[in-house]
């Protein structure tokens, strides 16, 4: 049942669900701050996130992750290179191709901002006993699975 004024469900959300929503909102705030400090637009920041996760990829692979054309991805890569956020190196087995990697300085700067939060969360979860940690992991795994399923459903469009 939905509230007729807001279009939102009128069911009282569980506090855990409310907290997950707050985490998502805070993640958006963190990304905004990181983009601002790195002097990146949203697409360039997404590119950096993929590069930091994968460590190295071809421009074509990056284009797939970003859902952009090759030409648009080249523009992103050029902007990132101009700002010193990435390096281009020849592919080790195909001299016609290049590999794109995040610069050590950009990785270091991002980790300086993120690691205190990551370590704080890690230290907190380690305070729980093994059984409690298993419940936390189970819950978070189900959140990830639910979000992944929803993303896949939205990307595939109406059935």
Image: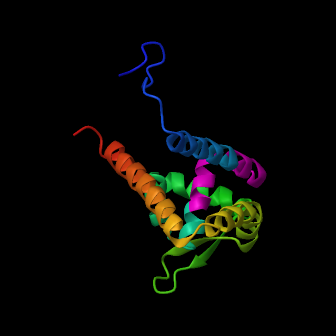
Q: Looking at the rendering, in which quadrant would you find the N terminus?
A: top left
Q: Residue furthest bottom?
A: 93
Which of the two residues, 82 or 96, is positioned nearer the viewer here? Answer: 82
Q: Position of residue 49 (x, y in %)?
A: 59, 60
The residue shown at (45%, 65%) is: 61
Whether residue 63 appears in this view of the structure is no
Q: Position of residue 105 (x, y in %)?
A: 76, 70
Question: Can you tell which quarter of the image residue 60 is in?
Answer: bottom left
Report the number of discs: 0
Q: Which residues are magenta?
A: 32-49
Q: Is residue 40 magenta?
A: yes
The residue shown at (70%, 68%) is: 107
Q: Residue furthest top?
A: 5
Q: Position of residue 140 (x, y in %)?
A: 48, 57
The residue shown at (61%, 65%) is: 125
Give the left or right position of residue 4, taking residue 77 as reference: left
Which of the two residues, 22 or 130, is positioned nearer the viewer here? Answer: 130
Q: Position of residue 35 (x, y in %)?
A: 70, 50
């Amino acid at each position: 049942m939905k509230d007729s004024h807001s279009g939102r469900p009128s069911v009282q959300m569980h506090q855990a669900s409310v907290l997950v929503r707050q985490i998502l909102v805070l993640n958006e705030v963190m990304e905004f701050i990181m983009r601002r400090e790195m002097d990146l637009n949203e697409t360039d920041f997404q590119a950096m996130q993929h590069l930091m996760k994968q460590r190295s990829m071809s421009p074509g692979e990056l284009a797939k992750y970003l859902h952009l054309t090759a030409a648009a991805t080249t523009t992103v890569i050029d902007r990132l290179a101009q700002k010193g956020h990435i390096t281009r190196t020849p592919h080790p087995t195909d001299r016609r191709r290049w590999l794109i990697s995040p610069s050590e300085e950009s990785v270091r700067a991002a980790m300086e901002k993120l690691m205190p939060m990551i370590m704080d969360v890690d230290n907190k979860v380690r305070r729980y006993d093994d059984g409690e940690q298993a419940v936390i992991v189970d819950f978070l795994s189900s959140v990830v699975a639910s979000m992944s399923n929803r993303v896949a459903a939205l990307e595939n469009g109406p059935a």
